[in-house]
Amino acid sequence: MNGPPAPAGKLPVHVLTGFLGAGKTSLLRRLLASPALADTAVLINEFGEVGLDHLLVEAVDEDIVLLKSGCVCCTVRTDLKDGLVNLMERRRHGTLPPFARVVLETTGIADPGPIVTTLIADPMLRHQFRLGGIVTVVDVPNGVGNLASFPESLRQVAAADRLAISKSDLASPGEAAMLAARLSALNPSAALVTLLPDEAPDIALLLADPADEAHRAAEVRRWIEAAAVREGGWRFHGHAAHEAGRHGDIRAFVIRAEAPLAWPRFALWLSMLLNRHGGEILRLKGLLSIESIAEPVVIQGVQHLVHAPEHLKAWPEGVHGTQIVMIARRLDPALVQRSFDAFVGSGKAQ
Ligand SMILES: Nc1nc2c(ncn2[C@@H]2O[C@H](COP(=O)(O)OP(=O)(O)OP(=O)(O)O)[C@@H](O)[C@H]2O)c(=O)[nH]1
């Protein structure tokens, strides 16, 4: 099996999502104040009017504005693809300043799945762009309620690489801690960052790029450590079982295998699983040990879509064997384990 082509030349598109009013635009505005992010194009995917006045300096045309930071901002009221193609065209023709990355701020009720699918699977886009990180903003006052009431909020949290907790200044430390616990139970593999009103947000929220080898190795290590810490919670005994029910039966679980996997069998199993249950699998991250390949292979997926596998240069210290973290709705971990055992080997769902 070969890894994906080098991402050089493709522009990363970072997705910034979060429920209505969670604080996406506020975070973006604060991030873009950093000179390190000046060469950023911003796509805002909104329904209806867009309140960009606070960001605006100069209107380039009716859809595109130049922000104070020098970033370009484009409001996409039609289609994500049109917006991205349009940005690239203008960059090529020199009517927009060159930019090194795109940040897409989604609507508050967006399901990130189709956005990710468009970015990765569209034949035109995938030659020019690649998916960067997915950052989801969740606010303390409303976060727990939104997760209980709106499936979109759950999907946004499940898809995240990084979860940013906003508005902790508007709630008690206890409420903030409760939200943090809820978020790490739902998506143990995402890094959790609390935004502080008086401190500039860390630009790594956007710049920590999954295509960077050192970053990827650190991320993998974190998922695995999170898996070890959260394993009790993931079985949903006691309190966790109660929480799982309140989250529309979303569960995170791990499949492990000690022996190296035969890639063709694994790939067949995964495509069958996603074909049958892709709608229920919100997020999938795995570190695979593959026969005849010394280095570990990383796979990542959001719903039906799995990114091209990537090779790490070495196994993270103390980590060995296949470990696949899945966040899924109404999917019995025992069923997944049985099918994994039958098709791939003697993996064990934890
Ligand atoms: N106190 C406080 N207010 C915040 C914080 N973050 C955002 N806000 C306020 O919350 C409101 C909504 O913030 P936005 O950044 O517009 O949220 P959004 O997620 O972009 O909103 P939509 O695009 O409408 O979904 C604004 O009035 C912000 O000033 C925070 O950390 N603390």
Image: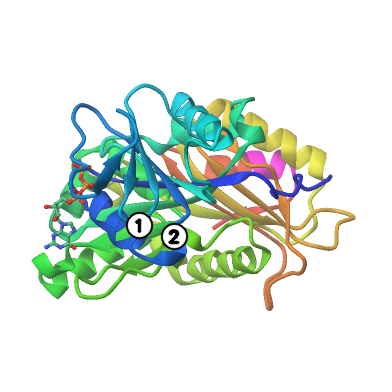
Determine the residue positioned at 15% across, 72% down.
174
Determine the main secondary structure of the stretch shown in magenta: helix
Work out which quarter of the rendered image holds the N terminus and state it.
Answer: top right
- Counting other residues with Cα less than 10 Å from the Cα at mark 2, is it few (<14), some (14-19), or many (20 or more)? some
Please, what is the three-letter code of the amino acid marked with disc 1?
Ser
Q: Residue furthest top?
A: 78
Determine the residue positioned at 72% across, 68% down.
320
The residue singled out by tag 1 in the image is: 69
Local secondary structure at mark 2:
helix
Residues 70 and 218: in front is 70
Q: CA distance from mark 2 to mark 1?
A: 8 Å
Residues 228 and 138: in front is 138
Q: In the image, residue 213 lies at what x, y percent?
A: 68, 64
- Label located before the other in sequence (2 or 1): 2
Q: Are marks 2 and 1 in contact (CB under 8 Å)?
A: yes
Inspect this view and state whether residue 95 appears.
Answer: yes
Numbered label tally: 2
- Please state if 261 lies on the left or on the right of 218 as rendered: right
Q: Is 20 situated above or below 223?
A: above
Determine the residue positioned at 16% across, 49% down.
145
Please, what is the three-letter code of the amino acid marked with disc 2?
Leu
Q: In the image, residue 263 lies at what x, y percent?
A: 80, 44
Magenta stretch in the rendered image:
339-345
Residues 92 and 204: in front is 92
Local secondary structure at mark 1:
loop
Asked which colour scheme the image uses, the reply is rainbow
Is residue 344 located in the magenta-colored stretch of the structure?
Answer: yes
The residue singled out by tag 2 in the image is: 37
Q: Is 91 situated above or below 80?
A: below
